[in-house]
Image: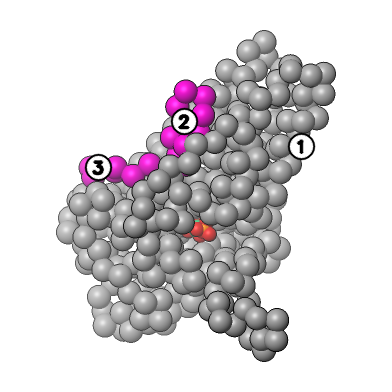
Amino acid sequence: MTNEIVQALIWKDNALSVLDQRQLPSVTYYDDYSDAQGVAEAITSMRVRGAPAIGIAAAYGVVLSLQQHYEKTSEWRDVVAKDIQMLAQSRPTAVNLFWALDKMKSVIAQESANLRTAAADCAITIHHEDKAANRTMGEFGADIIANAKGILTHCNTGSLATGGYGTALGVIRSVYARHSVNIYADETRPWLQGARLTVWELSQDGIPSTLIADSAAAWLMKSGAIDWVVVGADRIASNGDAANKIGTYSLAVLAKQHGVKMMVVAPTSTIDWSLENGNTIEIECRDPLELLPKSYDTPDSLVSAWNPVFDVTPAELIDAIVTERGVVLNPSQHTNGIASLRA
Ligand code: MRU
């Protein structure tokens, strides 16, 4: 088993420390938060990012809101509900955010005598269970990948993006713990989660990797160097369509062309059972300035930018969906999609 040193979120002394991922890899800096507003801003600005990590952060945000407002005035319920709404609006695509907030809302609805403690226990459990799920998925995924000589991953799906260990990167860690494998990471433009986060995170844990430009993926596949593309997800529909970082869909199309297998790794908190397919998943479009060179940002500029940050990979391009509850191979070939993963 490999070690993991990096921690995106630390809950200590009733406060939340968030590793500012915008500053990596050059600066390792934690911001401390004591209210929900700060946590919502940390999610929107991508100090913390990655589907499971933003769900966990939001859960702690609700705990902070209760610490601030519970029984301080007769309107505390309304104030906390507004904080929850603000957290829900911090990013639209990853369903883990809404899943975690729903869990926190049910704790509040129970109105236990020790509500602040009950809420903190719930958030800590969400955090710990996510990490445990990642360990389980790591082993499930590694069993399938068994003899791979090369794996390509996209975005960052490791300890930085989760409660710890990672989803797709967790599987890659587990494969690496079993046998030597060449790990390739896409840069993941425009935000560079691969270049700034994934290869950094792996190197912190003593795991070697090779960075490629996103546009080199087809040529890498053509060279025969990789057997699997392994990615995470932000929202998976009941039929197995999977929203993930922009560029994932391109990789799936390329993988099909080159006989490379495509694996999506995500905890069941990433599955949106209300969606029949991925057509209605809201795709976040971020500030064009995350993409546009500054010199084009002038009032008379003729250049604009379109910056969708997720895309949806259809189930028929996915060979395996790995969750902590089990694996679905070839999801598009099952009449009930991924229903076997439902509790
Ligand atoms: O915009 P980001 O960095 O939050 O996007 C993250 C991804 O797309 C990840 O692949 C996904 O959240 C899974 S993380 C385990």
Vertical side of 115 occupied by 302: above or below: below
Residue 112 x/y as whole percent: 67, 14
Q: Residue at x 50, y 45 (%)?
A: 53
Figure quadrant of the C terminus: top right
Which residue was labeled with disc 3?
3
User: Which callout, 2 or 3, points at the residue further toward the start of the chain?
Assistant: 3
Q: Which residues are magenta?
A: 1-18
Residue 241, x across and y down, in percent = 58, 63
Element marked by disc 2 = strand
Disc assigned to residue 82: 1
Which residue carries the number 2 mark?
11
The residue located at (57%, 18%) in the rendering is 117
Mark 1 lies on a secondary structure that is helix
Q: Amino acid at mark 3?
A: Asn
Residue 263: within the magenta? no
| Residue sitting nearer the eye, 23 or 50 | 23
The answer to whether the residue labelled 3 contacts the one labelled 1, judged by CB atoms less than 8 Å apart, is no
Q: Is mark 3 within 8 Å of ligand 1?
A: no
Q: Quadrant of the N terminus?
A: top left
Residue 16 among those drawn in magenta: yes
Whole-percent x, y for residue 134 in the image:
40, 43
Element class at badge 3: loop
Q: Is residue 2 visible?
A: yes
Residue drawn at point x = 24 percent, y = 49 percent: 205
The three-letter amino acid code for the residue at tag 1 is Lys
